[in-house]
Amino acid sequence: MSKADEEQESKYHVGDVLLAPAYGNLEQPFTGKVEKVYENSLLVEIIENDPADQPAVNEMNHRAIVRMSEVEVIQAAPHDDKED
C-alpha cells in the first residue's frame, strides 16, 4: 500500500489542524498540524500550546506523535478526492 493510499483511507490528512490531549512531558492539551499520517498515529507540528509547556515543546522540536483515537480535527485541510 502506498503512502497516498494509506492517507486516502484515513480520515486524517496532511495539513489538518488537531486538538490533542496532554501526554508525556506536556501537561496541557495542544494544537497541532498533521505532517505525516501513519497507520494508527499522526506526526504533528505543535502550533499552539500552554506557555508552561514551552520548554517541553522546544525539547521535542515542536513535533509530537499522537494516536488517531485521541485527537479531534478542528480545521480540515483542503484536499482533492480525485487524483490527476
Image (cartoon, rainbow, N blue to C red):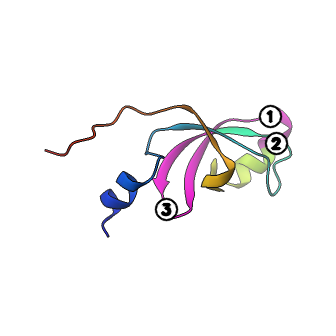
Residue 39 located within the stretch drawn in magenta = yes
Toward the viewer: 50 or 31?
31
Disc 3 from disc 2: Cα separation: 25 Å
Disc 1 from disc 2: Cα separation: 5 Å
Q: Does the CB distance between marks 1 and 2 fall below 8 Å?
A: yes
Label 2 belongs to which residue? 53
Counting residues from the N terminus, which is met first, the one under dot 3 or under dot 2? 3
* Residue type, label 1: Asp
Residue 24 located within the stretch drawn in magenta = no
Highlighted range, magenta: 32-54
Label 1 belongs to which residue? 50
Q: Does the CB distance between marks 3 and 2 fall below 8 Å?
A: no
Task: Using the image, determine if residue 75 lies above or below residue 68.
Answer: above
Secondary structure of the residue carrying tag 2 is helix
* Residue type, label 2: Asp
Counting residues from the N terminus, which is met first, the one under dot 3 or under dot 1? 3
Q: Does the CB distance between marks 3 and 1 fall below 8 Å?
A: no
Task: Using the image, determine if residue 24 lies above or below residue 71.
Answer: below
Secondary structure of the residue carrying tag 1 is loop
Label 3 belongs to which residue? 38
